[in-house]
Amino acid sequence: MVDQQKLIQTIAALEAKRAVLGDRVVDVTISVLQEQLDSLQAGSDNGDRLADQRKQVTILFANVVGFTGVAESLPDTNMLNLLNLLWQSLDRAILENGGVIDKHMGDGVLGVFGVPVAQEDDPERAIRAALAMRAALQEFVKEMKLDRPDVENGRPAYDLQLRIGINTGPVLLGEVGSGEEYTVIGDTVNVASRLEQAAPAGGILISHETYKVIRGRFSVEPLGPVAIKGKSAPIQVYLVLGQKPRTFYSSGRGVEGVETRMVGRDTEMAALQTVVQQTVKRRHGRMVLVVGEAGVGKSRLMHEFHQWVRALPYTVPVFRGRADQWNGRLPYVLIRDLLVNTFGIQDNDPASVAQQKLVRGMANLLGRPEEAVRAQAWAIGQLIGMEMGEETDDAPAQVQERAIQYLVDLFAVISNESPATLLFLEDIHWADDSSLSLVERLSLVCREHPLMIIGLGRPELFEKRPFWPAMAGESPDSQWQIITLSQLSKEDSQELVRDILRKLPEIPDDLCELVVQRAEGNPFYVEELIKSLIEDGVIVPGDVEWRLNRHSLADVRMPTTLRGVLQARLDRLSSLERMTLQRAAVIGPIFWDTAVIAMNQVSDPPLPPAETISALQALEKRELIFRHEQSMFADAQMYVFKHAMLREAAYESVLLRDRPQYHRHVADWLAAQSRERVAEFASLIASHYEQAGEMTPAVELFELAAMRAHSMYAIENAIDYYFKALNLIKSEPHQTAWMIRLQEQVSNLLFRQGRLVEAMQILDQLRQTAELEGDLAAQAKAWNGMAAIHQFQGDYADMLQKAIHAEQAAWLVSAEPELIEAFLHKSNAYLQQEDHEAASMALEGALTVAEKLYEPHEQIRYFSQIGAMSCQLEQLEMAREMAARIDHLLQQMRQDEESPRVMGEAMTETGQFYNTLGKFDRAARYLLAALKLLRKVDYLPGVGLTLFALGETARLRGNPKAAVPLYREALSVERVIGNRLQALWVRLRLAEVLTKVMNYAEAETLLQEVLATVSDKTTVMCWGETAQVKRLLVQAYLHQGKTRQARELLASPDAT
C-alpha cells in the first residue's frame, strides 16, 4: 500500500543516511520518491482519487527463499539489522525504477509499476528492478560469506535466493483505510504471484503479456506453456536471463497546433483525381474502394481529395455516409446516415418533422414540388427504418424494392445535373449486408451516369464481400477499382516526422529514428508518439519555436504498441477530463454532449454541466475528440473520437463495477431521445441495456430489432438479434415460453438461410425448452423441424424417427398442423425406404386430420402435398380426389373473397400439385393467376416460389428454353429475400435447363456454387441431391472439353 506520509518518512530516513549510503544513491532514490510524492500531492490538489481506478500496470512479486530459516538461526541482533538492510536494498531497487511498494508479506514483497501515473515502459522498469534486486541479494550473500560463514546449527548463513514473478495487465486500484492508501486487486496480481511460486530459485519469470512489451530489450528463454493455479489453460512464460546491449528508445506523444501535410500518398491521390477527370470527360463514373488498416491514413487521403475537389472550376456535389461498430447492424445504415446528414434529420426529431425534412430535402435535390416526391420519400424513409406512418397496404418487400429503385433514380438524376457527383462512404467494413448490397446496386448507376462512389474500409471488408476484388479486375476500363493504402515507407515516415517537428531548430536523427521505428509506417502512430513526447516534456512547444530537452530524452521510453501510447496519454489527463472521456467512451465512437452531461450529473459526486462542457472543450483542444458537423439529435452537439482505438483504451479504463450503471444511463437517454421512433434504434439501445445487466428490456428490444430486420428481409441481421436475445434470456429460467418463441423464430430463419447445422442445434434446444415448459405442441414443431432438415440432407432413417416423435407429441394435444406435418414426413421417409404400405398408411393419417381443418387455404396446402405424395405412391385415384377437393375449395375461397396473398399462395400450391399430376396446362393457369395476385401485394416469398413452379412447368413440358428466364427471375427473388435453401433448388434446376440449351459455362458456375455450399460441413452438412449436382457438373465439364476436372469429379463419392 502507498500513502504520502510513508513517502515523506522514507525520504527523511534516506537523508539521514546520506553519509553511509553516499550522495549518488541517495540523490537517485530521493528523486524517484519525490516524483511519486509530487504525483500524489498533485492528485490530491486537483481532486483525483488514486483509489477506484481501473488501470493497466505491471506487478512484481518477489520472495526471498530461505529468509525465514536464516533469520530464526541468527544468534544476535547485529545480523537482524543486516537483514533489515537487505530489505531496504530490495525495496530501493523497486523504487529507483519507478515502482511502488504495495505491501510486504513475510518473506516477500509486492511491487507495482504504473501507479500513480503510468509510464509506457512500466514492464521494462519492472524487469530492471528484478535484475537489480537479484544483484542486491547476490551482493548481500557475498558479504555474508565474508562476515559470518555459518551459524550455530551448521547451516550456511548465505543460503538465500530470490524468486520473482512479473505480469502485466489491468487491475483495480482499491482504496484502503482513510483513502490515502490503496492496493491492487485482480487476476493480473494473482498470475504474478503464481509466476513467482513457479519460478526457479534465483529466477525471474515473466508472462507473455509482459514479454510482448519488452521483446528485444532483454535476453529471455521461452519455457513454453506452464500450468498456473487458478488459470483454466497453461500460459506462455519466459525466464529472464539478462539485459541486452542498450539501444536508444524513448516514450511519449502528441502534436500541438501543427498543421501537417499528407505524405506518401501521391500515387493514390493521383488515381482518385484521374477517376474524377475521366468521369467528367466520359460522363460515366466508377466504384472506388480505398482499403487500409486502421490508422493508415484513409480519412486523411479523403480529406485532401475533398479539398482538391472543392477547388475544381466546376461544382461537384458531395454526399457522405458512414457506418460504425455500434450502428453497423442497422439495415441500410450507409444510405440512412447519408440521407439524415444531407437533409439535417436528427434522431430525436418527431416522426412528422423527420418526414418533412426528408420530403423537403428530396424535393430540393430533384428540383420538384414536395407533393411530387412524397411517395418516393415515404418509400425511402421506410427502407432506412424511419417511422413514416401507415400510408399504404403494400408489403415491405414491395416498398423495399421500390425504395431502392427510387434511390438509384435519385442519384442518376442528381449526377446528370453536374459534371460529376461523389458519394463518400466511410468505414464500410462496419456496414450491414443490406447496405453493401445497395452499394452494389448503386454502382450500376456509375456505368451510365457521372457518379463516383468512394468506399473507405479496412481489409476485413472482403470477408463480407470476397468477390469484390474480382469485380475490380485488371482492366483500366473496369467499373470497380481498389486503391490499397500500405504502411508508409521509412522515407515517408521520416518526412512526416520532420514536417510535424518543423518548429524545432534542429531535429536530431536519433529522435526521428525513434519515432519512425516505433510507428511502423502508421501515420496515426507517428502523430500520437510525437504528442506523447510533448506531454512528457521531451519536446517543449512555443509560439514560434519548439525546444528539445535532450536530458529528458535520455530517460524516456517509447511504447511499442499504440495501445500503450493511448493508455499513457489518458493517464495524464486531469480527473475531470479522464472521467468525461471514459463516460463518452461508454456511449460509443460517436457521442453527444448532453448524454455525457446527463451521466456526469448522476455520478458520485455529481458534476455540473458547465464542468462537463469545459472538460469536452479541453479534450477537443488536446485533439482526442472532434466536433461533428451535424448532430443526429436536436439540441445536442455530436462528437467523434479521433480513433476507434482511442475510444477502446478509454472504455477499458472504466471500472467494471461502474460500467453497468453508465450503460443504463445511455440506454435510457437514447430511448428518451428517439421517443416514438425507438424501433429504429432498438438494437443500439438493447446493446446498452445488455451491458447494463438489464436483461428484460434488452431481450425485448433485440426481439423488436429482429422482427424489424426480418420485415425488411435483412435476414442475417434478424438472426443476429434473435441470437442476442436468446443468449440473454438463458439467464431467466422463468421465461421459457418467451424462449420457445425466440427459438422457433430463429430456427425458421436459419433453415431458410441454409444454416442447417445451427438450425438443428436450435431445434434440439427448442425441444428441451418445450419439455421443461410442458409444451407438447412446441415439442412437435421441434421434431418436425429436425425431420425437415434430415429430409433435405437425405437422411431418411433419422427423418422417420423425428417424425414419429412429432406425431406422438402432436397427437397428445391435438395439434393438427403439426400432426399432419408429422404424417407427411413419415410417409415421405417410408417412401424413400421403399416401404410403400407404411407410406400409404401415414398418408391416410394425414388426410384424416387434414379433413378436420376449418380454413380452406390450410386444407389446400395439405391436400396438395397429400396429392403429390399419392402420385409418387402411384395412388392416382387418391390424387384425382385431392384435385377435385382443391378445385372446390378454391371456388369457395373466390366466393368468400379471400385476400390476394392467401388466394395466391393457395393457387401456387395447386399449380405445384398439378405439375406433379402432369397436367401442365392447368398448372400454368393456376400459377400465372397466383403470380399476378402475389405481385400485386409484392409478397416476394410467394413470387419466388411461383416463378420456380412455372419454371418447373416449362422444364417438365420439355421446354428448357422457356424455363431459363423463369428460373433466373426466381433466383433473383430468393437472393433478395435471403432464402438460400430454396435458392439451391433454383440453381440446380437452372443449371439443368442450361445444359439442355448448351450453355455449359454458366451451368458449371451455378453447379460449383451449389456444390461448395452443400459440401460445407459447418452449415448445410450434406444434401440428398448432391449426386445429381455432380452428374450435371460432369456433363458440363465434358461438353467444354474439361476432361481432367470431369475425371476428378467422377472419382469423388456420390458422383454417379
Image (spheres, rainbow, N blue to C red):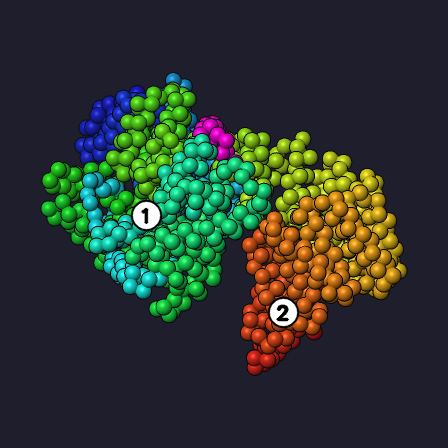
Q: Where does the C terminus fall, quadrant-wise?
A: bottom right
Residue with the mark numbered 2? 962
Q: Residue at x 78, y 64 (%)?
A: 917
* Magenta-colored span: 661-680
Q: Position of residue 536 (x, y in %)?
A: 23, 38
What secondary structure is found at the residue carrying circle 1?
A: loop
Q: Is residue 665 magenta?
A: yes
- Residue 156 at least partly seen: no
- Residue 550 at least partly seen: yes
Q: Is residue 646 magenta?
A: no
Q: Residue at x 22, y 58 (%)?
A: 491
Looking at the rendered structure, the kind of residue marked 2 is Ala
Neighbours of disc 1 within 10 Å: few (<14), some (14-19), many (20+): many
Looking at the rendered structure, the kind of residue marked 1 is Thr
Residue with the mark numbered 1? 560
Q: Residue at x 38, y 20 (%)?
A: 606
Query: Picture quarter containing residue 7?
Result: top left
Q: Position of residue 256 (x, y in %)?
A: 21, 40
- The answer to which of 646 and 896 lies nearer the viewer is 896
Left or right, residue 949 beside residue 94: right
Left or right, residue 148 beside residue 66: left
Neighbours of disc 2 within 10 Å: few (<14), some (14-19), many (20+): some
- The answer to which of 431 and 689 lies nearer the viewer is 431
* Mark 1 or 2: the one toward you: 2
Q: Where does the N terminus fall, quadrant-wise?
A: top left
In the depicted structure, whether residue 363 falls above or below residue 989: above
Q: Are marks 1 and 2 in contact (CB under 8 Å)?
A: no
What secondary structure is found at the residue carrying circle 2?
A: helix
Tell me the chief SS of the magenta region: helix
Left or right, residue 20 beside residue 1: left
Tag 2 or tag 1, which sits nearer the N-term? 1
Q: Residue at x 80, y 46 (%)?
A: 819
